[in-house]
Amino acid sequence: MRDPAAHDPFERRPGRGERGPRVFAPGDLKLLMLSMLAEQPGHGYDLIRQIESLFDGNYTPSPGVIYPTLNFLEEAELISGQVEGSKRLYVITEAGRNALSEQAIALDGVRMRIEVSKRALRGHDRPPEIHEAVGNLRHALHMHSGRWTAEEIERVRNLLNDTAKAIASGPADPVTENHP
């Protein structure tokens, strides 16, 4: 049986101009870039390199994704861009800092999804059994809709975040793992 973690040299990988796996959920990139600019001002190219390093070099966002996101953040007055030679230096605004503090929980989720994505980008494809379990989870969440109290939201959020962290941390030691 083939090791699922082994790279198949004949496996088709996305080429230039083709899409690979989706790395960010909607809104994730905006929030990540805003947080990076809160740490220090930067140019679009700087942000591309910072994001690339977050993914250990396994993902590099294209300028066609970064610059429209910067334009959106600037139009929303969350950042401001100042011309610096042939480049623009982007700086977070006070409104951007406020928006970032309001989205602290969402930013934690973005960072957690980045950790999960890093593993996927290293070639760890999902086996069919895991794909089925993810489908079961989505179905359970869909069937649960309409019964969300504050306590239930917190309970489910904690379950999902704890599970995601456990998966992202890597394989469990089979000797010490407890099975119910």
Image (tube, grey):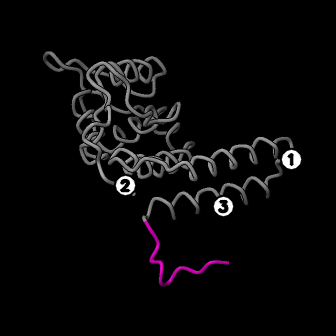
Q: Look at the image and say whether residue 61 sits in the magenta stretch.
A: no
Q: Residues within 10 Å of mark 2 (few under 14, many from 20)?
A: few
Q: Which residue is mark 1?
A: 147
Query: In the image, is 85 to the left or to the right of 68?
Result: left
Taking depth in this image into account, of 68 and 19 the one nearest to the observer is 19
Q: Classify the position of the N terminus by image quarter.
A: bottom left
Give the CA distance from mark 1 to mark 2. 44 Å
The disc placed on residue 159 is 3
Q: Position of residue 3 (x, y in %)?
A: 36, 57
Query: In the image, is 143 to the left or to the right of 8?
Result: right
Name the residue type under label 3: Leu
Magenta: main secondary structure: loop
Task: Tell me where the magenta segment starts and ends, as one range.
Answer: 171-180
Q: Residues within 10 Å of mark 3 (few under 14, many from 20)?
A: few
Name the residue type under label 2: Arg
Depth check, mark 1 against mark 2: the one in front is: 2
Q: Classify the position of the C terminus by image quarter.
A: bottom right
Question: Compared with residue 71, is residue 43 higher up or lower down, i.e. above or below?
Answer: below
Q: Are marks 1 and 2 in contact (CB under 8 Å)?
A: no
Taking depth in this image into account, of 135 and 30 the one nearest to the observer is 135
Name the residue type under label 1: Arg
Q: Residues within 10 Å of mark 1 (few under 14, many from 20)?
A: few
The disc placed on residue 164 is none
Question: Compared with residue 30, is residue 65 higher up or lower down, i.e. above or below?
Answer: above
Which structural element holds mark 3?
helix
Question: Compared with residue 56, is residue 166 higher up or lower down, i.e. above or below?
Answer: below
The disc placed on residue 2 is 2
